[in-house]
Image (cartoon, grey):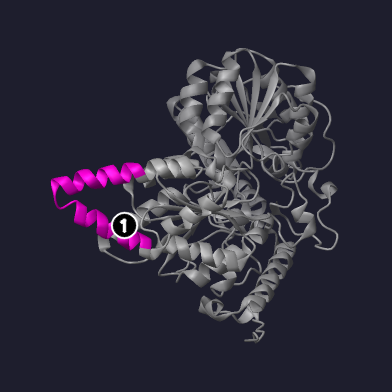
Amino acid sequence: MKETLVRIDISKIRDPSFVKALGPKSLAILCHDIRQEIIKEVAAYGGHLSSNLGAVELTVSLYRVFNPPFDQIIFDVGHQCYTQKILSGRSLAHLGEKAAGSPFQCRPESPYDVYEAGHSSTSISAATAFALARDVRKDKNEVIAVIGDASMASGLAFEGLNNLAASGTKVIVILNDNDMSISSPAGALGRFFRKISSQKGYNRAKKNYQRIMNRTAIGRWFYGLSYRMKNSLKRTLVPTTLFDNLGFTYIGPVNGHSVKELDKSLSRAKNTTKPTIVHVYTKKGKGYEKAENDKTGLYHGVAPFDPKQGIKLSENIANWPSFMGSLAEELLAKDEDVRLICPAMIQGSGLYDCFRKYPKRCHDVGIAEEHAATFTGALALNGFKPILAVYSTFLQRAYDEISHDIARFMCDATIFVDRAGPVGKDGATHQGLYDVSYLSSVPGAHVAMPSTPQEARALAEMSVLEKGHGLVAIRYPKDPLSGNLKGKADIRFGRFVFEGQGESLYIGVGPRGRELYKSLEANKNIAFCNPLFLNDFHPNDISRLLLYPKIFVYDSYSDEDGFLKNLESSLFKAGYKGQLKAVSFPHEFIHHDLLEPQLRENHVDLDFAKQELLQFLG
């Protein structure tokens, strides 16, 4: 029977159930239109591009085979959930702005978003808990975790797999494999056995057989014998995977861009009675040639761009991450003992040239922040000079290893803390506001934040090339840079930088702190202090602060539990009798929005800080 072609107006989708009735050609049109919508909106407003283009057919098939939100789909990280947003009636326009949707799954936003995350590898652990809750309530819904191959390599994912396998509860884990090769079974006999093991009739008969044989002692003995014989035959005839050995039913590999194949494999997974892995191969960036051919991660998370021209590398150069990447390159060139470690964010942290020029001394350890930290500490113990470059939001995942495996040994190691401060659209899961507070709790750790490229170069050279300082974390934002990037400031390790004379003192953290000071230069009665180091203050610097009757603090890069709390504590212990007023982020989770509105809403923008400062010190 000839299929009647149906073209869906994406802007009018409210209920995703329509996908169940579409034929093959109509599904192909739908997937094409969803891809074009993703490209259009991400190009206009920024967002995660390649991962979403690769997951279109997979998400459509999930909505055909299962019944969300009754059946619960958990996307690992959530950065590949744009197709789900479209199918559940949400727009991608202005994604990440306050009045629009979150760039990840968001529980308050939709009943289809049953879980939310911004960090990787949480989906299997969460899905195991959702399945346990289902079983306790005796519900009949399916629980599905969709996880990428890079996230699957993280330790947390393996912890979840181990616990899920031990529990035996039914969860369907979809491994969206777009890069890393994972062993898979081959041959017709293997496919035959796997097809039988995931059929509903087979599983019903197996459960009935087990129940009958367990009624008597001889039955239990015979069941054990037959079970061992079956598994012995299966191991002999069917190649096994890691997942088989963990106790999962394995289905795959499956073409992740064929809705027909996906429907068939997901239906088989639906019929299983124990934890199941569906191994799906997809092409990251599918449908947009420039993203398909990208091998560096340039099209993973993008700012607005022209989709016809693609992203120009020159558009991504003049910012703090690219500058710090160039400093890492300088340090690698100066000393052969320097080693660079990065957990999967080479492109984002501006490290591509480092890895290209010094491949044997640069280590991409994948999404494994805990391993990265322990690896860094052990390299330092062996005489190397390691730099760990990692986003602030991901660094918090390695807190134990930073304390236990780096600082405790008094290792000379450097952490480049990228994306320090507010991050705008990425929202609550990605804010880089909290590293000062948790790193300050680590004995012997020094936390610094330069206000100029020259200070950054001096800090980096001190930390990486000199000995005896222990762990140093150098924070910097994603903000753009302009002007002179050459030269090196004259600074002292662990000390504040004081500039100007005045009866009152303004303390400003980082680039925005210095920017505010520049706007005050006409006011000769206000002295400036660039703290540079945000914890473990030198007694002489605190003694100097005690001389000022009024101190105003502006820190737009951490919450009030970070530098401000450290300073207040030190001043209190020293017996400060003057007045202190501060502008800093509140100690809470800050949700998504454009950066400037995010600063204004939390009363940490430059205009508000200047007004408060002049009112207090003027």
Q: Quadrant of residue 30?
A: bottom right
Q: Residues within 10 Å of mark 1 (few under 14, many from 20)?
A: few
Circle 1: element type? helix
Which residue is nearer to you in this view: 238 or 345?
238
Total labels: the figure holds: 1
Q: Which residues are magenta?
A: 202-229
Which residue is located at x 61 percent, y 37 percent? 366
The verdict on residue 204 being magenta is: yes
Say left or right for 488 vs 89.
right
What residue is shown with label 1?
A: 206
Which residue is nearer to you in this view: 232 or 55?
232
Q: Position of residue 186 (x, y in %)?
A: 57, 47
Residue type beneath disc 1? Lys
Say left or right for 14 vs 273.
right
Q: Position of residue 477 (x, y in %)?
A: 67, 42
The relative height of residue 539 versus residue 284 in the rendered view (above or below) is above
Which residue is located at x 82 percent, y 27 percent? 487
